Amino acid sequence: MTRLDADTASRFASLTLGHLGQEYPNKLDHVFNSDTDALPPRVLHPAFYGSFDWHSCVHGWWQVLTLARHYPDLDIAANIRTRADRMLTPTLIAQECAYLDRPGAGGFERTYGWAWALALHGEAVRHAAGWGDALAPLATAFAERFRTFLPKLTYPIRTGTHANTAFSLIFAHDWAREHDAALARLITERAHEWFSDDRACQAWEPGGDEFLSPALCEALLMSRVLDRPAFARWFTDFLPEVGEGRPETLFLPATVSDRSDGKIAHLDGLNLSRAWCWREIAAIAGDDHPVAALARAAAERHLQASLPHIDDDYMGTHWLATFALLALTAGQRAG
């Protein structure tokens, strides 16, 4: 089974540090209220202007801090810490928080970027360098946005792209379990309301530009809010033929025809995020569950389909290593 090792960690960190300070090309999530709002990314987002977009910069920082924690003695770990000392500061994070108060910024990065900001804070507090304290106001702001938004979201968003509700709530719930008990309860309640009665999922995926599996993200979220026996029962109802390898589409890696096309390159992310989900689900379900061996084999196929391609083109390089890291460290939380 493919796992994270020091060489892979060093490669991922080198790739990601290479774009965390790269301002262009840049795809902004930005509402213009007047000509004065036409500002470059480094002014709008002084902490997170690097990478192709804001959320990729945020989860890029999550990735390199995670790698530095797992492999603190790597040569590149010192560079990560130096860069983090320069970028993850109270002054720069205060400016990121101020951006959230701009007119028209209520939907900024909803909810994908919100979740990654919480994940970054959750990782930062594991380090003794003060980055967690610096990021705390931003995490608090996004936690409040989740508390405001989730009660009025009548229907979950099930697409396999950034808006996917289940994916964001996996990370938000992981963070909230340690930092915000009320938010954790709210996420649990909403997940039950939206997903607990789902049965016989057809898994009509992937779509042509999806990087998340709606079916597997939903299952992974439910594994967070149900105990192990309850999850096993729910999962059997949700995917009743999974022990026979059906729906087959969930077990087959996606084909990526053009890795220079940013949307089509999403399918490499689908392969990596499915590998993450399958490994997590196998660990949670336990070896005696009929899906366990199938899930681990599917995860390995998906990894091998896309792991060699994370640096083929910038359209993938600016984000794929994060999802590869999720897959390579999956299952460590379970239990």
Image: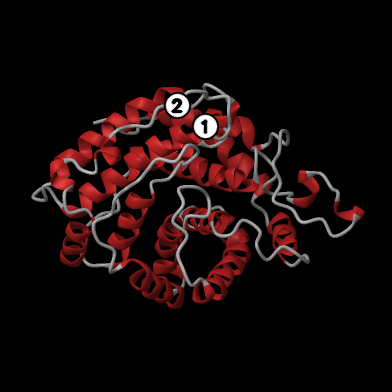
Number of other residues with Cα within 10 Å of mark 1, as a class: few under 14, some 14 to 19, many 20 or more: many
Disc 2 + disc 1, Cβ < 8 Å: yes
Residue 71 visible here: no
Tell me the residue that label 1 is attached to: 264
Report the side of 285 relative to 56 (left or right): left
Q: Secondary structure at mark 2?
A: loop
Residue 254 in the image: x percent, y percent? 38, 32
Report the side of 260 relative to 320 (left or right): right
Q: Nearer the viewer, residue 293 or 205?
A: 205
Q: Residue at image x 39%, y 76%?
A: 185
Query: Which amino acid type is marked by label 1?
Result: Ile
Report the side of 198 relative to 77 (left or right): left
Residue 66, image quadrant: top left
**Disc sitting over residue 256 in the figure:** 2
Q: Between marks 2 and 1, how big is the CA–CA gap?
A: 6 Å
Residue 175 in the image: x percent, y percent? 44, 63
Number of other residues with Cα within 10 Å of mark 2, as a class: few under 14, some 14 to 19, many 20 or more: some
